[in-house]
Each structure stands twice: as structure tokens, then as C-alpha cells.
Amino acid sequence: MSPKPSRGTTRTTQYQGNPRRILVGITGGSGVIYGVRLLEVLQQKEKDGIETHLIISPAAAITIKAETDYSSRYVEKLATKVYRFGNIAAPLASGSFRFDSMIIVPTSMHTLGAIASGVSDNLIVRAAEVALKEKHRLILVPRETPLTLIHLQNMVRAAEAGAIILPAMPAFYEKPKSIDDIVDHLVGKILDLLEIENALFKRWEGLSYS
């Protein structure tokens, strides 16, 4: 008997209705803490019917170790379901898989270039391609500086194909007091684009002049 193909690990949720599936890809760019924090917040939304389907690239696993005190195993436990990076036979590699949105946070320049060029050589890029062709929301969070003309052109190509480009740029109008404040502001912006209520950051209320 042939062994059944691995579909990844799954955590059972208590929500009984039709779940809202959100795909999260974490690649090897600096800023993996944004992806970790996003998963932490979305895990708290499981009771509201949010499912997270996670793919971590091998480079991201290295960056998680280099930049945070977390392990890849901790990050995986935050997701409802986890898929192997190279498993292009996974359900979310097909346009028939029903999902709501996909976020790649951070988006490495390698991943950005692959998406812009349509080179689906791993599950993160293939799922992003599916999101674009099936007209699902695709949010890319690039984290690189300075940017070359190639990087900029790839962002334009991805945006023209339908992706939302949300660079990992901090805002200072709320006078952040910690790295957590800066991370939460960006994650809150992602949740806004997903139309998920959050109070992770202070919203601009304007200035009063005397």
C-alpha cells in the first residue's frame, strides 16, 4: 500500500460555521516578528471563525532563530494548519481550494521576484499565484532597504497583477515606546486590509491648532 501524502499538521478548532481561511507565508527577509505577531493575533480570532494556513520557508526558519527568541515549532503551533514549503501537491496549490486572503510577511526580494515573474517553484509562491489568478486578496509585506530598480519594478508588476504592497515601514505619530508598538502598528494595518477589527495601534485623530 502506498503511503498517504503528508498534508501538514492540523489543530482542531471549536468554530462550527464556515471558517474564514487566511493563508500566511513567512519568508526569509528580515522582520519575521511581523509574521509571528500576526499569527498570535489571528489565533485569538479562531473563536470567530478565522483559520490560518501557514507556510514557513527554510530561510525564514533561519531568520526566526537569528532575529527572535522563538522557535519555528512555536510559530507553527500558532497556526490552524501548517504545510511544507516544498509540498506543491498541498490543497492550497490548487485554485479549487477555498480561501479568503493571503499575506506574505515578510516578503523577501527573492519571493517578490518569483511572484512578479510567475515562477512557482515552492508552495508560498504557488499559493500567491493562486490568490492572484482566483482574484483573492494578496498582501505582500516587503522588507528591504535600499531598494534597487529591480525590486521596485517587481513591486509594480505584482501590484499590476492585483497584489497589495504594504512595506514594513514604521509610523511614529503615535510615539511608539517599544519595538512591540512598532510591530503592532504594522500588524494592525494588515488586519485593516483583511477587514478584521483590531485595536493594535492608535488611529490618527488629527491635530488641533490654537
Image (cartoon, rainbow, N blue to C red):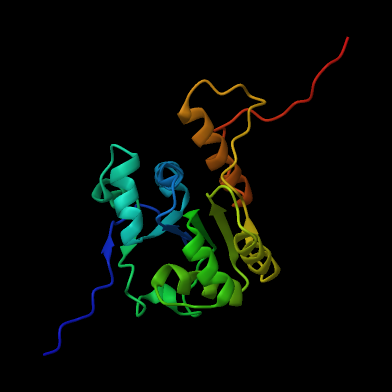
Q: Height in image: 10 above or below 42? A: below
Q: Give the position of the C terminus as an image quadrant.
A: top right
Q: Is residue 80 visible?
A: no
75 relative position to 20: left or right? left
Please tell me in which quadrant of the rendered image residue 3 appears.
bottom left
Q: Is residue 177 above or below residue 83?
A: above
Q: Residue at x 11, y 90 (%)?
A: 1
Q: Which x, y percent locates residue 10?
A: 28, 61
* Of 146 and 47, the residue lying toward us: 146
At x 46% / y 77%, what residue is drawn?
Answer: 120
Q: Is residue 51 left or right of residue 156?
A: left
Residue at (48%, 24%) from the top-left corner?
Answer: 178
Q: Quadrant of residue 31?
A: top left
Q: Position of residue 94 (x, y in %)?
A: 45, 80
Q: Position of residue 63 (x, y in %)?
A: 34, 49
Residue 74 visible, this orientation? yes
Residue 116 or residue 124, whichever sits in front: 116
Q: Is residue 31 left or right of residue 69?
A: right
Q: Residue 18 at what x, y percent from top left?
A: 47, 62
- Residue farthest to the right, as pictured: 210
Task: Please tell me whether residue 202 is drawn above or below residue 111 in the rendered image.
Answer: above
The single residue placed furthest to the top in the displayed view is 210
